Amino acid sequence: MKVADLHKHIKHADLWLAGGLLLLALSFLIWIQLYFGRAPGAAIAVSLSGQQVGIYSLAEDSTLEFDNNGYHNVVVIANGEAYIREASCPDQYCVQHDAVNKTGQSIICLPAQLVVTVLEDESGVSLDEIAR
C-alpha cells in the first residue's frame, strides 16, 4: 500500500480519537504521579501572608487556630494528615479540600492568605528552598 493510499484510509475522526486517547493516558499518568508518587510527609509548615509562622508534626494530633487578614481558620492534624476544619472565608474551598499528608501537597486559603504545606521532615526546609 502506498503512502497516498494510506492517507485516504485515515479519517479525521480517527485522528481525534487517537489524540483523545493520548490525552487521557497522559492525564492518568500525571494523576498517578501526583497522588501516588510522593513520599509521606512528617510535618506541615503554616504560612500567613507569605511568612512561615510554624512547623507542626503530623505524628501529633492537634488543633491549630490562625487569624489573618480578617479571617479565622482552624487547621486540624489527625491520623498523620492535615486539613482545614473551619474557615471564615466566603468560598470555603480550603475546607472542602482533601486532607494532605504527602510531601509537597498544600492547602491554600486565599482570602486569609494561609498556606499549609506538607514537609518531608520537621527541619523546616522545603523543596522550594532546596531548589534555590
Image (cartoon, rainbow, N blue to C red):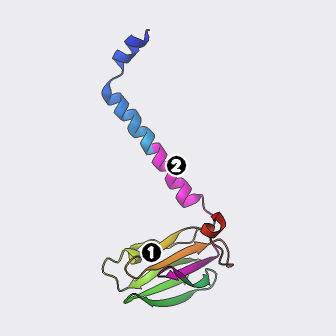
Residue visible at 34% across and 16% down in the picture:
8
Q: Is residue 38 above or below residue 23?
A: below
Q: Is residue 79 something that shows in the picture? A: no
Hey, what amino acid is under mark 1?
Ile
Determine if the magenta segment contains residue 18: no
Mark 1, other Cα within 10 Å: few <14 / some 14–19 / many ≥20: some
Whether residue 131 sits left or right of residue 50 in the image: it is: right
Secondary structure beneath disc 2?
helix
* First reached walking from the N terminus: tag 1 or tag 2: 2
101 or 115, which is in the foreground? 115
Residue 72 percent coordinates (x, y): 40, 89
Q: Specify start and end residues of the magenta stretch as a single range.
A: 25-51
CA separation in Å, label 1 and label 2: 25 Å
Q: Give amino acid for label 2.
A: Leu
Q: Position of residue 90 (x, y in %)?
A: 30, 80
Give the residue number, with chain letter if any, for mark 1: 108
Per the rendering, the mark at residue 29 is 2
Q: Is residue 129 above or below residue 48?
A: above
Residue 13, above or below 80 = above
